[in-house]
Amino acid sequence: MASSDSSFVSLQSHGVASFLLAQAAIGIALHKIVLDAEGRPIDYITVDANEAFEKMTGRPRAAVVGKLITEVSPGIRDEAFDWIDFYGRVALGGPERTIERHYAPLGRWFRIQVVSPEPLHFAAIFTDISEQKKTEEARRIQASHLAERVKEMRLLIKVSEIARDWKSPLPELLAKVAALVPEAFQWPESTGARIRFRGEEFASAGFRVSPFMIAEVIRVFGEMAGVIEVSMPEGPPAIADSAFLPEEENLLRTLSRLLSNFAERAESDAARLESDAARLESEAKFRQYVEYAPDAIFVADENGDYIDANPAACRLLGYSREELLAKNVMELLAPESREVGARNFATLTAEGESSDELQLLSKDGSPIWVSLYGVAIPGFRLVAFCRDISARKKAESTHELYFHALDALDQALIITNSEGTIIETNRAFLALYGYKREDVVGRNPRILNPGPRVYADLGHSAEDVQKLFGGLWSAARDPGRGHWQGVVINRRKDGGLVWVNLHVSSVFDEGGRVRNMIGLPIDISESRHRDLQGKIELYSTIAQVAALRDNETGNHMRRVGIWAKLLAKSIGQPARYCDDLESFAPMHDLGKVGILDSILLAERKLTPEEWAEMQKHTVLGFNIVKGKQELEMAAAITLSHHERWDGTGYPRGLAGEAIPLSARLTTVADVYDALRSKRSYKEAWSHEEALAEIQAQAGRQFDPKIVAIFVGLAPRFAAVFEELQ
């Protein structure tokens, strides 16, 4: 064979490289490495570049072709990244390399793939990924914001659960809350919390007083009883605009109201227990309880006129006892609660007991939410016990506002219980999947799973799918992790598929059991489609190299790909397999780039030596694409498409089903096209002649089962050939 330099010059002389570079949609530049006396890369010369390369890099072709890179970019040796060594390793026989770099002069990101078409030469293939990088950065920021909101929501859930199940003294609850608070802040490892209440102090491990602090008052029945504080002893990181986010300040306000409510409940319950005991001892003690009870107590007759009220009732509404005794029950009801109050009074007089939540009007006209429990006692007296629940109502309103904020997020969100049943979702989730809320609440997220057949069609084995979802449940139920992230395929209500980057976070109780799971699916279908199209374009470009070396046409490659896919679909191969075959079958003769023109383009019968050299194109093509997972099918096709069913083919003499299926399918498609096409050494055959020849070679050159499928598809083969001549 000729030397590397002469082979490359030959490639240029036939115009192949220039045609390929001009036509490719991605930026491509061909270079030759320059070595020093010891064979080390010290520079490289640009041989050619296409228009896309000029547009992407801002360097006109005339300014770089034929010049050393150190002339074009004098400062290249001063850069931190050694480009000459990076490219030189590939040009000197190293493996294909890919890198992503930011090009500051243009403010653009590029993915650079480097391959060596022949010794001492390399091709740099540029793909502009700036938009992809912007999307990734936007998603990273969005995910960070969502993570902060999820931490805050998890804290509120944990605090609510502690209070709900709480049976210990109030100080124990406050100590647990103080320890939990730093978890919800953006830098938990450098954040501390302290709660001071009724002269006692409860602090997390990292709390210290510092200039960077926020605090909220804890009020019990309207009076200051304590304070909750959050500090950052070392100050915020350099990347932060401020020590605390506005959302964190809102979270602290919500926590202070929750703690106020808990404290009021605790003190009210304690007071009630003490008063109940006193009431059992004597009427005098009962009266004392009424007088000093923290809850408001009203006594009315059967007409609703007040006949007694305790000091707490007077404080609640701002009236004196005498002013209250001059009023009727209905006079103290806020307008929006009068219907509820009238119904409650009727129930009390008729059944002897009633309870409700309603609003009373204070002396200054402001409404006050109360929880009311009424009981009728002998002597036509109606006693109402009222507790001020304004703080709780306000907290509930805050919680509702918090949920509405989540519902308004553009990020889809789903919340399940410990069994995986959906209990809540937001509008973005419903819009992503095309469901209504009533369609999903109460059901399992499995309604989004398209099933094993879809995963199989897209190239995922049953073992892969089991590992994927098994890993999800294992991580989500492990208190040591509690988070999982991975890419899954979902099905919309209309049947369409959507690829999502799914984040799952779990909320655990004190025993380490899952309480809730929060799912955040991020739609990556568009970026996945762009990546797939980019790969297809790259594979098509690679296939053109071989086709142009052999004076083939682009339509030849398209026909072979289409026919191979038709055969694969007809024998029941998955959709992903069929699509890959359509992309890789045209690459079968890739190795011909390494065959001399004197052999490849000879218009005569080759000598035995020349024929032996020609047969090497299978191994040459295999060596170009081997070792790359996504090109495994291409490697199998390039190496084995000249193997024969009877074992007399080359290069390895494989027989029968030992020949890869992809190569057997490609061989039938390629031979049919070769027979139908005119060559320098033969005329084109008719469809009928080609069909008869392939049938005659069943069991010898071709897999007989594939030939049987081919015969049934023969009219479609003929139609494609006529359409794409």
Image (spheres, rainbow, N blue to C red):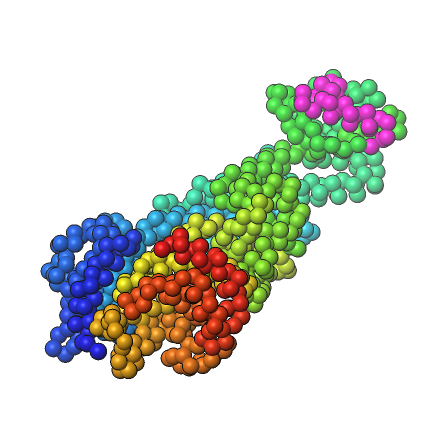
**Magenta stretch, overall SS:** helix
Residue 479 shows up from this direction: no
**Magenta run includes residue 341:** yes
Does residue 301 appear to the left or right of 410 in the view shown? Answer: right
Which residue, as the protein is rendered here, is positioned at the far right? 378
Residue 296's spot in the image, x, y percent?
A: 71, 31
> Camera-side residue: 300 or 510?
510
In the rendered image, residue 51 lying in the magenta stretch gets the answer: no
Q: As rendered, which of 381 and 683 lies closer to the eye?
A: 683
**Residue at image point 42% right, 45% down:** 244
- Asked where in the image residue 357 lies, by quadrant, the reply is top right
Q: Position of residue 549 (x, y in %)?
A: 26, 65
Q: Residue at x 14, y 79 (%)?
A: 38
Count the marks.
Answer: 0
The correct choice, above or below, for 293 with respect to 711 in the image is above
Q: Which residues are magenta?
A: 327-353
Residue 396 in sight: yes
Quadrant of the image containing the N terminus: bottom left
Q: Quadrant of the C terminus?
A: bottom left
| Frontmost residue, 273 versus 498 | 498
Q: Position of residue 210 (x, y in %)?
A: 40, 49
Q: Position of residue 115 (x, y in %)?
A: 28, 67
Name the residue located 17 percent from the left edge and 68 percent from the top edge: 9
Q: Give left or right: position of 441 versus 79.
A: right
From the viewer's perspective, is 621 left or right of 118? right
Q: Quadrant of residue 604?
A: bottom left
574 over 637 or under it: above or below: above
